[in-house]
Amino acid sequence: MLVARTAGYFAISIQEATRATYARRWRHFDDWCAQKGLRPLPAAPETVMLYLADAADGGAALSTIRGWTAAINRVHLEAGHPPPGRDPAMAMFLRGISRVASRRDPRRVNAMRISDVRQVCRHMAACEVDQAAARDLAILALSAEGLSDGAIARLNWDDITITRRTVRLDLRAHGRFRARTLTFRTKSRAGPTLVDVLSRWKLASENHGPVFTSPSRADLHGRRLSKSAIFGVRKSRLSAIGGLTAWQEDPRTLSILAGPPSDVLRDKALILLGFAGAFRRVDLTRLRWRDIRIVREGLVVHLNISKTDVMGRGRDVGIPPGKSALTCPVRAVTAWRQRVEDQLGPSAVDETPVFVQVGRSGRLCCDPITPEAVSRIVQRWARSAGLQGKWGGRSLRAGFISTAADLEIPLELIAEQSRHATLDSLILYIRNDDVFRRNSAARLGM
């Protein structure tokens, strides 16, 4: 029992995520040794030097090389062998690699400063009108009025007359069905009416030809949706919302389909929360809704574990509301939570990750997005908003620190929010991409 407990303490000395990273890096080293005919365990310091030199020649960053060295050392240590990375000759070798790497052009991602965040959020606001959702809401409304999938698929805009209070459908003869005219009058009930949803879709569509087409940009001619496609739309949308049978049975349908797309709400909350909290990518992916509390001053985000808190003591991070509704992280997170509650139910929210995967029909999964997905989300929105540069998940953290430094906020206060252990590591995040920003010569009165 004592031996087992001792082994257990040794095993949990590093985080599971770190152990998985070490395992992945070790497999890479093991495969390289197999190709070169060298022994990976125990590896001679010269073998590790050859491996790292090959990686450096291939363009590997200095941080990546240090990570590979740490993984090789850890595997040797747990196997009872001396870590080759601690050999005196290895220290000199790594110093030489550092000098070469420092001469290269930095491959760091750009800092997404507050001006960039505003530009991205303005672009997101322009993307909040979802053509596919407007179309699908109209399909659900007509289906709820008793029209078959085939009749819905055959509709042309010339067959529909919309007034302030009525919708008239001139259904053409088809097969054994005769031509007929249906008139629907607005009923006094909560939620969207048939007039509302058809008018909204008419404004968003081409306004001629088939009523229901694919709104994809690649489909320039507005290909008509088939009967089976109409059925697929109804099934996928109602299932994604929560297993409803008709659109008017629950007001959630209006907020989901007539509101911003779920992925836009999620991505806006992720970008603003990641920026305001100077969070690392893995911090965002680990968050669950029970870790976020709404208080009078804003949000309190509890980190159960982080890079500078490997013992898991926990840390609270305060997120104050923004002065502008466009970039307010509290509003963005609250709007995203409301969407999650609408689709998954209030009782299931606390146990789910904050940032989950979103399906093509707006379905919310219960699986968290990955750190790599955070980088892709930031990259996609930065590029679509017209921002030039190299962007990634670290752009949010670097953007907060760089913006705070531009405002001459003391480094100690910046480090308190960003949870840096030392100011030396904090300074590495400050991007000096403008030689006139914080230029001391401008204050000399010359």
Image: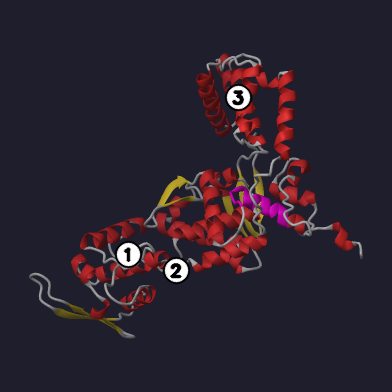
Dot 3 falls on a residue whose secondary structure is helix
- Answer yes or no: is residue 251 visible: no
Q: Which badge, 2 or 3, comes first in the chain's sequence?
A: 3
**Numbered badge on residue 51:** 3
Mark 3, other Cα within 10 Å: few <14 / some 14–19 / many ≥20:
some
Circle 3 or circle 1, nearest the eye: 3
Q: In this view, does 263 lie to the left or right of 247?
A: right
Q: Distance between the residues labelled 2 and 3?
A: 52 Å
Q: Quadrant of residue 422?
A: top right
Q: Where's the N terminus, which quadrant?
A: top right
Q: What residue type is labelled 2?
A: Val
Tell me the kind of residue under disc 3.
Tyr
Residue 369 pos. (x, y %)? 49, 46
Magenta stretch, main secondary structure class: helix
Whichever of callouts 3 and 1 sits on the residue coming sooner in the sequence is: 3
Q: Position of residue 231 (x, y in %)?
A: 24, 60
Specify whether residue 256 is painted magenta: no
Question: Residue 323: in sight, yes or no?
Answer: yes
Label 2: state its secondary structure. Answer: loop
Magenta range: 390-403
Q: Residue under circle 1?
A: 214
Magenta region includes residue 402: yes
Quarter placement of the C terminus: bottom right
Q: Name the residue under label 2.
A: 129
